[in-house]
Image (cartoon, grey):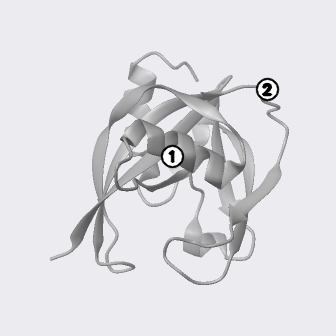
Amino acid sequence: MPREVQKVACYVVHDGHLLVFTHNDVPITETGVQVPAGSIQPGETSEEAAIRELFEETGRHGHPVRGVGTQEYDLRPARDEIAVRHYFHMNMEDVDLAERWTAGELDPSHGGASINWTCWWMPLTNGHVLAAGFAGLLGVMLDEGTAP
């Protein structure tokens, strides 16, 4: 039986665009297009985890606007794990939609060598391309009033 792991996922939206990233040294066919996301640490609320993960994965600060919902995602066969993702609609100040920047993790939670990626702003209308089920609650967020 796979273990359940509490996670967060961040929908950072600005002017009809969604903050995403793609890995630099791993083929897109393996990692896809992702949103900032990660595990909730012991003693941390899901909102606190979203703020922390956004900063850790992008080097930028943002704040939650509201919770969007929760969704389970089965990571098998990659990992024997069910991710229970708590999604947040988030804002970020001082956004330049044309900007691309490099970020990454020196010590990934799953172990292994450091990894890096490129962050960028994708039109919300292309959100269907998100990997690993991350697009699952975009429609819910849009229904709550975030115009594309």
Task: Indicate left or right for 68 with 131 as reference.
Answer: left
Residue at 57% in and 69% down: 31
Disc assigned to residue 94: 2
Give the vertical position of 105 relative to 17 (above or below): below
Nearest the viewer among 102 and 45 is 45
**Residue denoted by label 1:** 128
When asked about the image quadrant of residue 95, the answer is top right
Q: What residue type is labelled 2?
A: Asp
Residue at 44% in and 60% down: 132
* Image quadrant where one finds the C terminus: top right
Please identify, in this view, whether the residue under mark 1 or under mark 2 is nearer the observer: 2
Q: Is mark 2 on a helix, strand or loop?
A: loop
When asked about the image quadrant of residue 42, the answer is bottom left
Q: Position of residue 108 (x, y in %)?
A: 57, 72
Give the vertical position of 144 relative to 36 (above or below): above
Task: Indicate left or right for 57 with 147 as reference.
Answer: right
Give the vertical position of 72 relative to 65 (above or below): below
Q: What element carries label 1?
A: helix
Question: Which of the two labelled residues, at mark 1 and mark 2, occupies the earlier sequence position?
Answer: 2
Give the Cα distance between marks 1 and 2.
26 Å
Residue at 33% in and 80% down: 77
Work out which residue is located at the far top of the displayed protein and give it.
Answer: 145
Q: What residue type is labelled 1?
A: His
